[in-house]
RNA sequence: GCCAAUGUGGCUCAGGGGUAGAGCAAUUCACUCGUAAUGAAUAGGUCGUGGGUCCGAUUCCCACCAUUGGCUCCA
């Protein structure tokens, strides 16, 4: 594919950059179509994106909904048919600003002001449309062959909440129609994996307006998975020397003033409540509670590290627009722990946390993740605890540990917690934006605020360092992730129903009941389908609706031979077994969580 | 919170100014059945909530609530 560079040269595009040039050019063509249909529209940014492109546009008082898209798309097709040539020219800064002002493109004019003094300011033109841009672009509009406008949304100018919200028109573009079709198919499949859809059909959790928004409730089947996850992670933690505690879901406002959370996050906490002139909040996190548990008694350096863990209920007043099923609610349960360590122990403890994270990921087959070292933005004097020396020390300590461990990570500025840097492990859900699953944060700040101490070898009082960490993140979010990864086909040990007993007819119902009862007594989660239906129907519903790992089919043959027939979800094969043999095999597998 | 869209029986969805429809699920009856849907019948909804326009609203308008897709935020 030929492309037009901003110095006017036409070059052959490297294969790997083709798609981005195509998508970026699609944004320009969309802008041209919009300008033809809405002459009063003014443009902000219009970049290529992951799967396509978008353009942020100020339509003035005109409301643009999704019903406006077909006409714009039609106009784009017309433009590609017109096969307009892309042309490029450069203007001196002042002329460029004037040109943009003249055309009412105030956002573009403002953008020129943000560019470095020596920046070349170039314009790409196709037909009647001119856009300030660094390019490169396709040479003729006909090169754009497969695209589609997908949805509209709002987006703040320059991504800043204080600025005006523009209308963002989103589209996808690919090299060919086949690629576009494949993408659309993929979107459909992702929707089918959405944890909210599966959670509803599998009766894992629910929400209700009368309970309140962002407050999902786990139903018996969902809570079964929850409890298994809780047992699983606590077992791992106990082996690593964690001690589990139970602390209340409220705390005094003073507790959060001490920690500094009150100053930073008051607006995202449920409002303060006053009882008998004492002020409380629903707790948004557990660090302060665990700090006070540490402070409950004096500590020697010999006691450290002390690892306090809790499956802890938290409440955060998340903005309504950010709520998403059990992935992000206003109540959630963190798989939280705070490790109180000496400075010398930092490396070993971070290392142990990182090992635990990847050990857990291995157990769940999680391979698609991204590690981020989240650092402070030194220019942000509001968000971050002010202590340059502390930050430099903490950040380089964490970076060094991660590097020594051979973890590959990217660094992101301004993503740290207010009290310290962190390692975040991020994953991509079926639908929507990436989020953090696991985190490990290095904190030199809160222990000092709470005046935590230990007596060192030389008899002097020292301040411990704290590692905040969450492996499953919140159980809620982890479950959301698991649902989407497994499509609801949970491994045996997590399956809400592990065995479904299916009598062929009423003649074998009594025996089936006995088998069912026996399985349950052996600690296996079994259900009996005693509906008056054909066996084929029962198998279909156990497979399709509930994705049950094992079906035990009981007919007159099994009754007379005192056996059971076991159908495996993986293979769809049915084999004869004895009840005792099946029970022990199953118990072993469940115990080993394989 | 902001921008936009959506809201019809338990679930998935159709319809549309003259007080509602399908499939699945449920219930009942018949069948007693061998590995991905037996048949028939019945029941179930003041069409998110509250206002307004109209002879008449679930359908049009407004407000609110919830949900969804984005933006901002995420200790």
Image: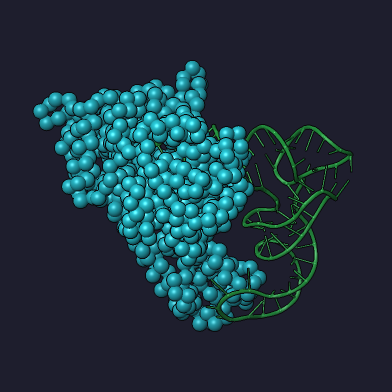
Chain colours: A cyan, B green
Q: Quadrant of residue A35?
A: top right
- The outermost residue toward the top is A277
Confirm whether residue A555 shows in the render: yes
Q: Residue at x 11, y 31 (%)?
A: A457
- Expressed as whole percent of the image width and height from the top left, the position of residue A278 reads 46, 19
| Label total for image | 0
Quadrant in the picture for the C terminus of chain A: bottom left
Confirm whether residue A497 shows in the render: no
Q: Residue at x 49, y 44 (%)?
A: A129
Task: Identify whether A542 is placed above or below B47.
Answer: below
Q: Quadrant of residue A250?
A: top left
- Expressed as whole percent of the image width and height from the top left, the position of residue B10 reads 65, 53
- Expressed as whole percent of the image width and height from the top left, the position of residue A372 reads 30, 44
Which of B61/A539 is in front?
A: B61
Which of A539/A85 is in front?
A: A85
Quadrant in the picture for the N terminus of chain A: bottom left
Q: Residue at x 46, y 25 (%)?
A: A280
- Expressed as whole percent of the image width and height from the top left, the position of residue A124 reads 42, 45
Which of A141/B2 is in front?
A: A141
Task: Identify whether B58 is placed above or below A300.
Answer: below
Q: Judge left or right: residue A130 versus residue A15.
A: right
Q: Residue at x 53, y 56 (%)?
A: A82
Q: Judge left or right: residue A90 versus residue A105.
A: left
């Amino acid at each position: 594919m030929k492309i037009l560079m901003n110095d006017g040269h036409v070059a052959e595009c490297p294969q790997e950059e083709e798609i981005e040039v195509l998508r970026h050019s699609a944004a320009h063509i969309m802008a041209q179509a919009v300008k033809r249909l809405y002459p009063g529209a003014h443009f902000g940014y219009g970049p290529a994106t992951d799967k396509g492109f978008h353009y942020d546009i100020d339509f003035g008082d005109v409301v643009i909904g999704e019903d406006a898209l077909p006409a714009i798309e039609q106009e784009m097709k017309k433009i590609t048919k017109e096969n307009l040539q892309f042309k490029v020219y450069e203007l001196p800064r002042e002329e460029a600003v004037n040109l943009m002002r003249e055309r009412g493109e105030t956002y573009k004019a403002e953008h020129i002001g943000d560019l470095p003094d020596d920046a070349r300011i170039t314009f790409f033109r196709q037909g009647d449309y001119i856009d300030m841009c660094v390019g490169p672009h396709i040479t003729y509009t006909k090169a754009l062959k497969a695209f589609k406008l997908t949805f509209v949304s709002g987006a703040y100018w320059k991504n800043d909440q204080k600025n005006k919200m523009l209308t963002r028109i989103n589209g996808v573009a690919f090299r060919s129609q086949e690629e576009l079709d494949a993408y659309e198919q993929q979107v459909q499949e992702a929707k089918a994996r959405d944890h909210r859809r599966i959670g509803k059909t599998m009766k894992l959790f629910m929400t209700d307006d009368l309970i309140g928004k962002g407050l999902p409730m786990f139903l018996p089947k969902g809570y079964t998975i929850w409890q298994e996850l809780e047992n699983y992670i606590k077992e791992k933690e106990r082996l690593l020397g964690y001690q589990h505690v139970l602390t209340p879901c409220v705390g005094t406002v003073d507790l959060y003033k001490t920690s500094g959370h009150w100053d930073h996050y008051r607006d995202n906490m449920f409002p303060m409540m006053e009882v008998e002139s004492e002020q409380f909040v629903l707790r948004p996190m557990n660090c302060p509670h665990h700090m006070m548990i540490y402070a409950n008694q004096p500590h020697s350096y010999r006691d450290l590290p002390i690892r306090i863990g809790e499956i802890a209920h938290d409440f955060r007043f998340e903005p309504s627009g950010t709520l998403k099923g059990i992935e992000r609610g206003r109540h959630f349960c963190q798989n939280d722990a705070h490790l109180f360590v000496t400075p010398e122990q930092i490396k070993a403890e971070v290392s142990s946390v990182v090992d635990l994270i990847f050990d857990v990921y291995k157990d769940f087959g999680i391979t698609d993740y991204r590690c981020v070292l989240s650092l402070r933005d030194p220019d942000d004097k509001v968000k971050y605890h002010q202590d340059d020396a502390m930050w430099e020390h903490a950040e380089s300590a964490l970076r060094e540990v991660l590097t020594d461990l051979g973890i590959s990570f990217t660094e992101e500025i301004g993503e740290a917690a207010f009290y310290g840097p962190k390692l975040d492990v991020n994953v991509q859900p079926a639908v929507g934006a990436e989020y953090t699953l696991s985190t490990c944060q290095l904190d030199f700040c809160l222990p000092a605020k709470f005046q935590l101490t230990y007596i060192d070898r030389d008899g002097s009082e020292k301040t411990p360092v704290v590692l905040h960490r969450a492996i499953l993140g919140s159980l809620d979010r982890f479950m959301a992730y698991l649902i989407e990864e497994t499509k609801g086909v949970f491994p045996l040990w997590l399956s809400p129903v592990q065995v479904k007993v299916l009598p062929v007819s009423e003649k074998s119902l009594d025996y089936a009941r006995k088998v069912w009862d026996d399985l349950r007594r052996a600690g296996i989660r079994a259900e009996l389908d005693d509906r008056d239906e054909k066996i084929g129907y029962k198998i279909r519903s156990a497979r399709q609706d509930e994705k049950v790992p094992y079906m035990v089919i009981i007919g007159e043959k099994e009754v007379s031979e005192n056996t059971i027939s076991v159908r495996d979800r993986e293979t769809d094969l049915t084999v004869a077994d004895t009840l005792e043999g099946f029970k022990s095999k199953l118990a072993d597998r469940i115990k080993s969580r394989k």
